[in-house]
Structure formats: structure tokens, C-alpha cells
Image: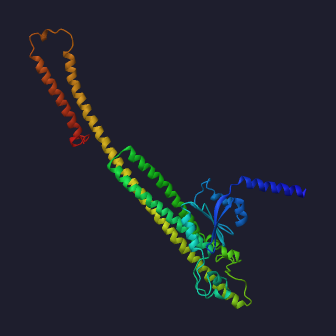
């Protein structure tokens, strides 16, 4: 029975492997060295120790919005084209050959290696119990440096897309203002749709950063290195903030707890300042998009006013033509009466009456037309010179 169960489990695992499609990932370690791997989601789950539901946001087919998930051993990023998994030791980045991802990979390779100071590097200073109280190193740990690169890349990417959209939108709007045509209207419609989509993407990134800023627990959870070292976060429930194991003496224990608390709070403040900086940058991009939207709205208002003016001109022209039609109908009535094929005795030897009928009918028609126009002018139904 055990053998059969083992065979069934192996069969299920093989079926899962067949149903999952391996994707291209690039692995960058803390030394800045990188290598390209072909892994499916089950390989990633075994390597990073995360759940399958967390990997769903990285699926390009599902089109999940931007998200920053903090888990026990990893930070999962889905920021536009940046789909990454950050641990305390390495960074996994999806689609490394993409044109938008290549600069991110280069920046990670450049900035992830630890900068040495003096005789030791950042992690040596951080890992020494005697250096906690005296260390002045303010560098972030590996996972936060990787997160900083990702946030910087996505902020620059969104800002560049906003600038490109603005460069294309403002001339199109000005051209539409000067000449209303179907081509210009379609062009502005496409730009407005692109602006709406870009605004929602920028807003989602901003919401994710603000969500981290609003919760100290989430910010503390970004320090994956502390979790690996068995260190509690600065905002733990029991109020005890430690970086290392318990000291043998009570006095040194209290001093280390106080120093670690101050050090943890300083790091939390530094992380908050970092997130605030990128939140401000994204907010600037969002404000630029709002300014563009206001310009589009103002252009639409101007076009609506212009179209209303043309519509009013057409209505005035229709009023003038209708008045002229009423005046000519009087002339047509006289013509119809005298054009009847009915013999009249009073028409004999009175040929001169024809010209008087024509003249009087014309005068009456013109007088009727002028009376209607004057009445419309007094009621402000038409403007001067019918415009």
C-alpha cells in the first residue's frame, strides 16, 4: 500500500510538472552575480518557500494590478513589467530579456553588492554584537536595496511614460482646437484612453506604497534578514526589541535592548523616508497626469462651446430662411390667385394692374420679412449680421 501511495504521489507530481509551463528567470545574489534559470511555479515554491496563491499575481496571463506582498521569507513584487521575488539572499526576476527589464537587471547587479567600509562590510558590522551600539552604518539590508532598485525603476518608467504621453497629447489637443476633424478627434480619443489607463496604473502603485507606509508591521516585515536571524521587529507586541540573543548579565541585556530599539526605530524611520520619497515621486507623476486631464477637460469644454456657437449660428440661419420662406409664401399666394385659369370680367382692359400687383406683392413680402427679423432682433433670437 505504501508503495502504491508513493507511486500515486510521484504520478501527481509528474502531472503537475507537465501542466505548468517553465518561465525564464534571472537570479541575482548578494554579490551581484546573475544567472538565467528556467523554472516553473513549483520549482519557485520549493526554492523560495511561498504559496501558490502568492505566485498568481506574477502570472502575465491573469493581468493582476500592481502589488507588493510581504511574506515570511520573501517579498513578492508585481510592478508593471517588474515581476520579482526578493529574499534575504537573492532576487528572482521574471523575463530578464525584456527590453524594460534589462535596465533593472543591470541596476541590481550594480547596486546589490555590499559596499565595504573600513575593515568590514555592512553585514559584518551588523552581525557583530559589539558593534550594534557603535555602528554608524545606515545602509539597508540586501532585500531593501533590491526593493529600492525596483521602486526607483518603476517610478522612472511611469514618469517616462507620462512624459511621452504629455508630449504627444498637448500638440494633438492644440491641433484639435484649431481644426475639428474626425482624424484629430480619433487621435485625442486614443490619447485620452491611454491617459486613463496610465492614471489607474500610477494610482495603484501609489496605493501600494501608501499601504506600506500606513502599517508599521508591514514595513517591519520587509526586513527579511531579521527574520532569518531570529530577530523581532521594532513594533513587536511585547515591546521587546532585540537584535541578538540574551546577554548573560541583566544590565547588559537592558542596554542591548535599548540600543537595539533605538537602532530598529532608526532603520524603520529610514525605510519610511525611503518609501515617502518614492511616494512623493509617484504623486508628482500622478499630478502631471491630473494636469493633463484638466487640459483635456478644458479643451473639451472649449470645443463644446465652439460647437454650441456653430449650432446657434445654424439655428439663426434657419430662422432667417424660414422668415424668407414665409415672406415669399405671400408672394406665391398672389401669384397662385392670378394664375388661376378662371375668366374674370374685371381683368378686361386693365393690363396696367399686373405691374401694380407685382410691385405691391413684393413690397408686402419684403415688409413681412423685415418685420420678422426686427422682432427676432428685439427678442435676441438672432445676433448682429446673423452671427
- Can you say whether 352 is above or below 378 in the image? above
Residue 186 percent coordinates (x, y): 42, 46
Tell me what residue is drawn at x 19 percent, y 20 percent: 334
**Residue nearer the viewer, 323 or 66:** 66
Residue 79 percent coordinates (x, y): 57, 62
- Can you say whether 235 is above or below 2 in the image? below
- Quarter residue 385 falls in: top left
- Quarter residue 205 falls in: bottom right
**Residue nearer the viewer, 385 or 27:** 27
- Quarter residue 264 falls in: bottom right
Left or right, 211 with reference to 2 = left
- Can you say whether 365 is above or below 113 in the image? above
Residue 296 percent coordinates (x, y): 40, 54
Tell me what residue is drawn at x 22 percent, y 18 percent: 336
* Residue 291 visible in this rendered orientation of the protein: yes
Tell me what residue is drawn at x 18 percent, y 16 percent: 338
**Residue nearer the viewer, 4 or 234:** 4
Amino acid at each position: 500500500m505504501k508503495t502504491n501511495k508513493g507511486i500515486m504521489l510521484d504520478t501527481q507530481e509528474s502531472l503537475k510538472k507537465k501542466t505548468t509551463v517553465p518561465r525564464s528567470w534571472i537570479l541575482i545574489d548578494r554579490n551581484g552575480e546573475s544567472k538565467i534559470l528556467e523554472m516553473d511555479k513549483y520549482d519557485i515554491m520549493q526554492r523560495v518557500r511561498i504559496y501558490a496563491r502568492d505566485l498568481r499575481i506574477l502570472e502575465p496571463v491573469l493581468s493582476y494590478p500592481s502589488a507588493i506582498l510581504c511574506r515570511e521569507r520573501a517579498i513578492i513584487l508585481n510592478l508593471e513589467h517588474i515581476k520579482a521575488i526578493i529574499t534575504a539572499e537573492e532576487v528572482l526576476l521574471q523575463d530578464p530579456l525584456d527590453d524594460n527589464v534589462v535596465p533593472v537587471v543591470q541596476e541590481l547587479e550594480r547596486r546589490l553588492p555590499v559596499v565595504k567600509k573600513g575593515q568590514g562590510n555592512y553585514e559584518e558590522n551588523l552581525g557583530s554584537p559589539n558593534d550594534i551600539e557603535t555602528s554608524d552604518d545606515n545602509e539597508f539590508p540586501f532585500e531593501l536595496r533590491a526593493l529600492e532598485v525596483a521602486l526607483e525603476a518603476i517610478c522612472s518608467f511611469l514618469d517616462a511614460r507620462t512624459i511621452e504621453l504629455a508630449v504627444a497629447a498637448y500638440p494633438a489637443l492644440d491641433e484639435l482646437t484649431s481644426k475639428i476633424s474626425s482624424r484629430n478627434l480619433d487621435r485625442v480619443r486614443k490619447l485620452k484612453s491611454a491617459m486613463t489607463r496610465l492614471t489607474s496604473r500610477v494610482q495603484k502603485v501609489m496605493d501600494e506604497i501608501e499601504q506600506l507606509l500606513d502599517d508599521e508591521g508591514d514595513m517591519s516585515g520587509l526586513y527579511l534578514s531579521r527574520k532569518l536571524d531570529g530577530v523581532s521587529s521594532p513594533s513587536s507586541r511585547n515591546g521587546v526589541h532585540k537584535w541578538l540573543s540574551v546577554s548573560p548579565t541583566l544590565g547588559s541585556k537592558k542596554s542591548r535592548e535599548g540600543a537595539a530599539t533605538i537602532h530598529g526605530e532608526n532603520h524603520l524611520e529610514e525605510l519610511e523616508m525611503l518609501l515617502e520619497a518614492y511616494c512623493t515621486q509617484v504623486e508628482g507623476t500622478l499630478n502631471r497626469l491630473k494636469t493633463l486631464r484638466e487640459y483635456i477637460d478644458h479643451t473639451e469644454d472649449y470645443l463644446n462651446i465652439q460647437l454650441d456657437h456653430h449650432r446657434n449660428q445654424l439655428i439663426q440661419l434657419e430662422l432667417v430662411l424660414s422668415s424668407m420662406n414665409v415672406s415669399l409664401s405671400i408672394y406665391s399666394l398672389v401669384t397662385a390667385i392670378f394664375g388661376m385659369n378662371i375668366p374674370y370680367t374685371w381683368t378686361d382692359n386693365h393690363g396696367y394692374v399686373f405691374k401694380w400687383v407685382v410691385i405691391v406683392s413684393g413690397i408686402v413680402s419684403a415688409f413681412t420679412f423685415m418685420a420678422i427679423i426686427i422682432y427676432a432682433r428685439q427678442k435676441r433670437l438672432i445676433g448682429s449680421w446673423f452671427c
